[in-house]
Image: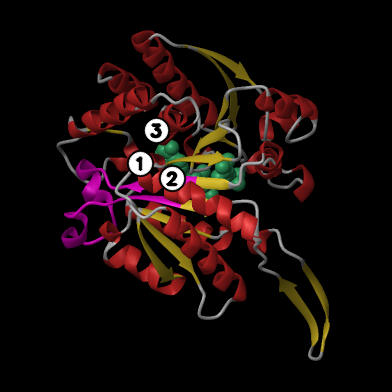
Amino acid sequence: MKYNIALIKGDGIGPEIIDGACEVLEFVGKKYGHSFNFVPYLAGGAAIDATGEPLPEETIKGCLASDSIMLGAVGGPKWDALPGNIRPEKALLGLRSALGVYSNIRPARLFKSLASASPLDKKITSKGFDIVIVRELTGGIYFGVNGRREGKDGLEAYDTECYSVKEIERIGRVAFKQAMGRRKKVTSIDKANVLESSRLWREVMHRLASEYPEVEYEDMLVDNAAMQLIKNPSQFDVIVTSNMFGDILSDEASQLTGSIGMLASSSLGASKRGLYEPIHGSAPDIAGQDKANPIATILSAAMMLRDSLGRKREAKAIEKAVEKTLRAGYRTPDIAGESKTVKVIGTKEMTQRIIENI
Ligand code: NAD
């Protein structure tokens, strides 16, 4: 098969890590008989420098015409003083909304060989964990009515959480489908003891749960979930939650795995086309020094193969190669830790070692 992939390398370490992921995809293509036509587009700081705007129309058109999109990261100190509407990060929200991607999927998995990098106690990490967080991405309090007004005590500000049945149902289905392909458990996280929007969320999730009898379903309040993630993360398989709760809990879960340089993500909407990116930023402090960990981006490419291009075998081959490379003791500086027995290597060599193990 031939696939058209829009590439947004972005700023800082973006170009280095995207180049690594493309090399891996090209190798996989040769091995399994596919070809990738990579088409570069500008967004973020690089786009501001070239065109004066963070998300040129050509980038949106190109992404919409592609089979899928891979994004490095955008932003950096060079553009920090610009006003909000022309800052590099504006490109991310614009892109998500133009592509209509309403679900953000972040796997948080503890690689056994990296257990010592997790801040959790050995008693907990010895059980391992492999969680997928499904976060609603285009609704809730981040998109609700907000403003400032004069209240009885003077100036006050408000934000509103609003979810429709349609929005809850579509994100719920994403979670149940994910669970069906995994360990068949869904934990829906809300604050139904206080919030009316959470009570509707719960009603809709219960209805969906009855459509998936094979899936074990549970509700959990968000305050308890924040605690349980630290106390016993292995109890979770798929977590589904609202935009704001997902924002917070997915960052918490990512830290439990040890390094931000390891975590991939996908954003998907109604079509198969998705936006795939590492969860970290452009790391300007290490840009251009061959120090960036390319694994989060390489694992994002594996997610793209599985979830947008329907290539499960090829995705698995990449994931296994990453594990094998880590088991062999190869580490980029961010995951090297204190151990004297690991081999510390750069972005390019890590990419090559992973390719050798595919
Ligand atoms: P960051 O994620 O870029 O970096 C935080 C720390 O993690 C840094 O010490 C960095 O060196 C390290 N790090 C990040 N990715 C790494 C990798 N792959 N390998 C090794 N180390 C890695 O977050 P920040 O410093 O807060 O933000 C830097 C810039 O990135 C800002 O302009 C911010 O707005 C932007 N940003 C962009 C995105 C995105 O494009 N999706 C997300 C977050 C932040």
Using a 10 Å C-alpha cutoff, classify the residue at mark 1 as few (fewer than 14 neighbours), some (14 to 19) or many (20 or more).
Answer: few
Q: CA distance from mark 3 to mark 1?
A: 18 Å
Viewer-proximal residue among 137 and 213: 213
Tell me if residue 112 is in the magenta stretch. Answer: yes
Badge 2 element: helix
Residue that label 1 marks: 181
Q: Which mark is residue 299?
A: 3
Tell me the amino acid under the disc marked 2: Lys
- Residue 255 lies in quadrant: bottom left
Verify CB contact (< 8 Å) between mark 3 and mark 1. no
Look at the numbered disc 2 and say if its residue's Cβ is closer than 8 Å to ligand 1.
no
Q: Amino acid at mark 3?
A: Leu
Is 297 placed left or right of 104 in the picture?
left
> Is the residue under label 2 in contact with that under label 1 (CB below 8 Å)?
yes
The image position of residue 35, as x and y in percent, is 48, 10
> Which of the labelled discs sits on residue 311, or is there none?
none
**Residue receiving disc 2:** 177
